[in-house]
Image: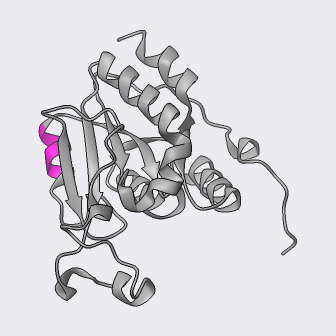
Amino acid sequence: MAASAASYKDYEIRHRNPNPKSAALLVIDMQNYFSTMAEPILPALRFTVDICRAGGVPIFYTRHRHRSPEDYGMLGEWWAGDLIFDGTPGAELLPDIGRREGDRVVEKNTYSAFAGTGLEETLRELNVQEVIVTGVMTNLCCETTAREAFVKGFRVFFSTDATGTSNRDLHEATLKNMAYGFAYLVDCLRLKAALSHKR
């Protein structure tokens, strides 16, 4: 199959705004370990957090960490010698990500924020029907979480400017996948317009 230079925008044929009354914001793995990928998106991430908070949208932060070989799973094979261990500086959330007392932190040990974390049950209890995905890495934990949310029946909104990863190709590839089959794409300006008009 020949390589394609198509933009993710070529696949963005569906458009919708999140409903602040039924949405939750997921801020994925904005930790010291990922600081080089996280820092470039911090302004967009903070803007997104602020507008969601102002719109009454509940905010969930995830923190990836491992505690023992029992929780490595396939990541132990795939990223041998490069895991994030609980209690190390790399496992801590970055300080400037807009987190406030009372914001929930979801502890996870694989790409999905849903796997074994109780996140789905908490979202259901809050009558959340939509999730807005932000954070890092676009093509790993953000994409996996978005895909699983879609399969679980949540409407998914995926940020184009408040997600980041190691290079532009991987970022764009995920945005194409999301637009094609899993999520409505949003950015800061679109979210601001949507959430400033509460339903």
Q: Is residue 72 above or below residue 193?
A: below
Q: Residue at x 24, y 63 (%)?
A: 108
Q: Residue at x 39, y 86 (%)?
A: 81
| Location of residue 131 by image quarter | top left
Q: Which residues fall within the magenta stretch? A: 121-125
- Looking at the figure, which quarter contains the C terminus? top left
On the question of residue 81 being in view, the answer is yes
> Main SS of the magenta segment?
helix
* Residue in the foreground of this view, choosing between 31 and 6: 31
Q: Is residue 61 left or right of residue 7?
A: left
* Residue in the foreground of this view, choosing between 24 and 32: 32
* Residue in the foreground of this view, choosing between 150 and 136: 136
On the question of residue 184 being in view, the answer is no
Q: Is residue 28 left or right of residue 57?
A: right
Q: Is residue 186 above or below residue 11?
A: above
Q: Is residue 38 above or below residue 111?
A: above
x then y, percent, for residue 123: 20, 42
x then y, percent, for residue 154: 34, 44
Q: Residue at x 34, y 49 (%)?
A: 153
| Location of residue 70 by image quarter | bottom left
x then y, percent, for residue 93: 29, 50
x then y, percent, for residue 88: 24, 67
